[in-house]
Amino acid sequence: MNYSQILQQKKMSADEAANFIKNGEIIGASGFTPAGHPKVVPTAIAQKGELEREAGREFKVTLYTGASTGDELDGALARGKVLKKRMPYQSNASLRSEINSGATEYADYHLSQLAQNLRYGFMDKVTTALVEACDVTDDGKVYLTMSNGNSPTYLQMADQIIIEYNQSVPQELKEMHDNYIPLDPPHRREIPIYSAGDRIGSPYVQVDPQKIKGIVWTDKKDAAAPFREPGEVEKKIAENVVDFLLHEEKKGRLPKGLPYQSGVGNIANAVLSQFATLPGISNVTLFTEVMQDAFFWIHEADRLNFCSTSALTFSAEGNEKFVKDIEIFKKKIMLRPQEISNHPELIRRLGLISMNAALEMDIFGNVNSTNVLGSKMMNGIGGSGDFCRNAYLSIFMCPSTSKGGAISNIVPMVTHVDHNEHSVEILVTEQGIADLRGLSPVNKAKKVISNLAHPDYRDYLSEYLSYGLEHAPSRHIPHVLGRAFELHQRFIETGSMKLS
């Protein structure tokens, strides 16, 4: 490969690059799930923080990313005790501990909004962009790797840029990105995407090369978790989702060819695996934020039309498949900024079918995606709010119970509301489906209890609803506040929601 002059002239070590990071820095990093994030400079920043503390000097940084990232970024900075604030989404155990202890501030944010709100000046400006790239040209063209995320906005806003040049990723990725930043109001126009494969931007992000302070050469691959085969509960949830979609098609309420969005995790993978195997499924177009290994199953079943996404988060085996057949996949995949992949205008206009996981659901149709017992942050809202409110059909999925049945994920009232009854349409567990469209609160509750709740908790939930209809101050949403969190309180006191 012929290297550009800038790759060689700006080459430096991770420690040298970390010296550009000062106390109070606002870092905008690449990465969306464990894909395309910087992997060596963050460790050097954490080590610098330790040295600064030993010298009696304060050293804290704020980190903005695309979404969750790999342990080399979120984990390294969290364990290094250098994170003052983090947004918009995370899934790292070390970082989660720092957030829940109060050591790191965390602002949970809709993924579609962060880039534009930074440009609007609503939050502290990015001072340093730290991104992974597969190429950089002398005139300032930066080519991203396995994710896009918020990198285009960070690169353009930052006062200084540090790049990790990753030689382990295929150069064909340069052809798969479509970088596009909408104009800000009042000059914004419609986003001219009318099908998933429409290209509207450029394959690179243009920056001022003078802002590039250092380029650290690496060959570290993304370290996505190994794929786990879906269990029986996950398979049953997936079957219920597919049965519902086929039913909607037969009723004439679901036009063929609408694109799908699917969240992260084993339930999402299980649903997409059904698209590859079950009869009656039309070829699939994906307009989503993250693509996992299920992509390969749909492709191998010859049921994939196209995939527009913001990140490719494959297992090690999936990465090998991707590299091996990249000449085929570069015609089937496009990587976009999350501001575009999650944009409400496109979600509504293209008619997406949205499928996301939940922590708990209540009988009146509210969904908690983020906080355990109303307080303990798990990961964050991610893009689920972007899709839920704007999708042609919005589906939330979770098992009816967790922890071996000790927790009912169907409760009288969720302890934290991320998606309220006005936006939530379809709920699914392994027990069945609850189509809540057009129902009054009480009728929603009856359907949720009978169709979604585990048999161990169904009688309790039915009794709660009956008690509310008799004793609540209103029959519209018959909550009895003194009883609404009985299940949660029982779990806190005994370790189980089950009646003794």
Image: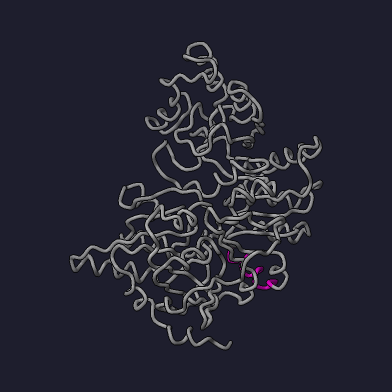
Residue farthest to the top, as pictured: 470
Residue 324 placed where, x, y %? 68, 73
Magenta residues, dominant SS class: helix
Within the magenta stretch, is there residue 320? yes
Please indicate whether residue 466 sits to the left or right of residue 172 in the image.
left
Please indicate whether residue 433 sits to the left or right of residue 300 in the image.
left
Residue at 66% over, 33% down: 432
Within the magenta stretch, is there residue 80? no
- Location of the C terminus by quadrant is top left
Residue at 48% over, 60% down: 69
- Location of the N terminus by quadrant is bottom right
Whether residue 213 is visible: yes
Which of the 4 image quadrants contains residue 239?
top right
Please indicate whether residue 345 sits to the left or right of residue 26 in the image.
right
Which span is picked out in magenta? 314-326
Residue 127 placed where, x, y %? 38, 66
Whether residue 404 is visible: no
Coloration mode: one colour
